[in-house]
Amino acid sequence: MTFRLLGLAIAIFVAPLAANAQLTIEMANIRCEQYLAMTPAQSRDFSAWMSGWFSYQLGKTTVDLVAHQKNIANVKAWCQYHPQETVMSGLKNATGQ
């Protein structure tokens, strides 16, 4: 009986640790070819993250949704010609950061 209780206690302790496993992505290392190959949902999320990061860097506190869509189109067009470059380096060059 005590063996079962000890096993249950260990299982209860270890289960939350396994549930908190996370995937870490270094956003600065995403290359254009990877960005262009993303699914629409992944591309949308990545673009939103990058837009938010650059807005923070530039001190912007507003979001222009029309400009956001134009920026995404411009980045994708640039990436077509620079598939080995990182998206971050292209954005830094474009914004002068």
Image (cartoon, rainbow, N blue to C red):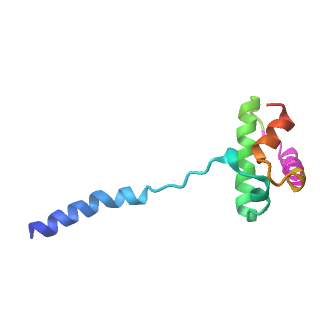
Give the prevailing secondary structure in the magenta stretch. helix
In terms of depth relative to the viewer, which is nearer, 41 or 84?
84
Percent across and percent down for residue 64 are 83, 42
Residue under the image location 67 percent in, 47 percent down: 27
Residue under the image location 71 percent in, 52 percent down: 46
- When asked about the image quadrant of residue 20, the answer is bottom left
Percent across and percent down for residue 48 are 73, 49
Q: Residue furthest top?
A: 59
Quadrant for the N terminus, please.
bottom left
- When asked about the image quadrant of residue 15, the answer is bottom left
Percent across and percent down for residue 53 are 70, 39
In terms of depth relative to the viewer, which is nearer, 9 or 65?
9
Quadrant for the C terminus, please.
top right
Question: Seen in the image, is 38 located left or right of residue 21?
Answer: right
- Assess whether residue 17 is covered by the magenta stretch: no
Question: Seen in the image, is 38 located left or right of residue 79?
Answer: left
Q: Residue furthest front?
A: 84
Percent across and percent down for residue 55 are 75, 36
Residue under the image location 86 percent in, 46 percent down: 71
- Assess whether residue 76 is covered by the magenta stretch: yes
Q: Residue furthest left?
A: 1
What range of the chain is rendered magenta? 63-77
Residue under the image location 21 percent in, 65 percent down: 8
Above/below status of 54 relative to 20? above
